[in-house]
Image (cartoon, helix red, strand yellow):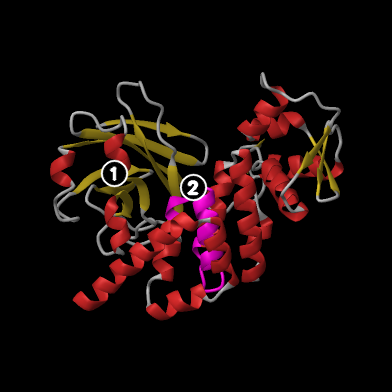
């Protein structure tokens, strides 16, 4: 077990490498017997990572084909709750392979045994074909980032005549420069609307725009860029996120409006490599799956490689025969049939698995 720890002003981040030996044996065990546990202390709290090689116990059968990871909180919050982000990815100790895509979940923990949302790391069949599995073992890099317990203080306080620096307002200043357009050097045309922006800021946030504006394959432009197949409102919200790291459009209480915006923003985030925005949209959509949205969201998850969101949509759709029938009657299901026919096989497989569980219970 190897670990590193980084202390910043407001957060504590701890990283550990979890090596799983004897994979072939653990994957044939019962889910709980094959569970590998690792404990360590971060920011004065005890945490436990549980890795399941034989699938996630207590969930739908579709989860049994995945390597899954959960984070458990083993303490009691000193304040109202503890804000933490849990992330993990596969790594190659030899350094020959790049780490896999990092998957994460941000949550609030208060009482003992509070747990994060399960992270589906990789399907076992995919792991077995990859180079991450070597000599019947593989390594997972896990990280816990905890926001420190900071008491409420005035914007500035004076200690022995010295005024401390107030909290950062960088996001507000960048938001103002976006709104004013001062110094803008590129204009985007989206569905007939114009948006002025700054290439350097966009490139710093998006690897796609970095390559487009400053890479070897950069386009020769006159300062205007047309964006096709995107709504102006979604592009505006994405730009606001790029400059401020916030998405106020997803805080609206109107579920239908927020769901539609989250769907458009997820596609935009995937298009421009904005991983954090993509995760925010996945989380918002995961919490709002309904009969009316399940099929559309499933198609979106399939098209943009959102494995956890996809699994949650499948689980919702097949949870009862009545739910399945209602979803199949929606316009979204017709869109799913036309755009993602391959996912229908997975849906049928899940429905059959759920039907067997009904009869066996």
Gap in angstroms between the C-alphas marked 1 and 2: 17 Å
Secondary structure of the residue carrying tag 1 is: helix
Residue 246 vs residue 137, the one in the foreground = 137
Percent coordinates x, y for residue 251 in the rendering: 64, 62
Q: Earlier in the sequence, mark 1 or mark 2?
A: 1
259, above or below 145, in the image: below
Packing grade of label 1 (10 A; few <14, some 14-19, many >=20) is few
Q: Does the magenta stretch include residue 71?
A: no
Q: Which residue position holds label 1? A: 125
Measured as percent of width and height from the top left, residue 35 is found at 20, 50
Residues rendered magenta in the picture: 286-309
Residue 223 got which mark? none
Q: Mark 2 points at which residue?
A: 305
Residue occupying the point 42% across, 38% down: 13
Residue visible at 65% across and 55% down? 264
Q: In which quarter of the image is residue 76?
A: bottom left
Asked if 196 appears above or below 55 in the picture, the reply is above
- Say if the magenta span includes residue 296: yes
Q: What element carries label 2?
A: loop
């Amino acid at each position: 077990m190897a670990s590193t720890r980084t202390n910043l002003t407001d957060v504590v981040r701890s990283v550990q490498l979890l090596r799983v030996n004897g994979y072939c044996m653990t994957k044939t065990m019962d889910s709980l017997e094959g569970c590998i546990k690792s404990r360590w202390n971060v920011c004065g709290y005890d945490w436990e990572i549980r890795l399941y090689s034989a699938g996630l116990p207590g969930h739908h059968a579709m989860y049994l084909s995945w390597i899954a990871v959960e984070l458990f909180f083993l303490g009691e919050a000193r304040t109202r709750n503890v804000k933490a982000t849990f992330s993990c990815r596969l790594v190659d100790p030899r350094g020959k392979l790049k780490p896999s895509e990092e998957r994460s979940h941000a949550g609030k923990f208060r009482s003992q045994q509070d747990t994060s949302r399960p992270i589906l790391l990789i399907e076992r069949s995919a792991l077995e074909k990859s180079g991450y599995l070597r000599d019947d073992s593989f390594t997972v890099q896990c990280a816990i980032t905890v926001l420190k317990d900071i008491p409420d203080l005035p914007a500035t306080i004076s200690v022995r005549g010295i005024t401390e620096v107030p909290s950062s307002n960088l996001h507000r200043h960048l938001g103002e420069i976006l709104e004013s357009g001062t110094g803008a050097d590129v204009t985007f045309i989206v569905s007939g609307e114009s948006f002025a922006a700054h290439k350097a800021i966009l490139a710093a946030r998006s690897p796609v725009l970095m390559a487009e504006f400053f890479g070897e394959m950069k386009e020769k432009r006159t300062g205007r860029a047309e964006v096709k197949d995107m709504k102006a409102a979604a592009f505006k919200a994405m730009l606001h996120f790029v400059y401020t790291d916030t998405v106020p459009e997803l805080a609206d209480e109107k579920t239908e409006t927020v769901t539609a915006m989250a769907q458009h923003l997820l596609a935009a985030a995937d298009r421009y490599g904005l991983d954090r925005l993509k995760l925010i949209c996945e989380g918002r959509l995961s919490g709002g799956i309904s009969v009316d949205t399940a099929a559309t969201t499933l198609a979106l998850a399939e098209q943009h490689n959102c494995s956890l969101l996809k699994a949650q949509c499948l689980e919702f759709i097949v949870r009862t025969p009545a739910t399945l029938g209602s979803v199949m009657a929606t316009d979204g299901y017709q869109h799913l049939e036309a755009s993602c026919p391959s996912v229908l096989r997975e849906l049928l497989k899940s429905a059959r698995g759920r039907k067997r569980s009904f009869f066996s219970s």
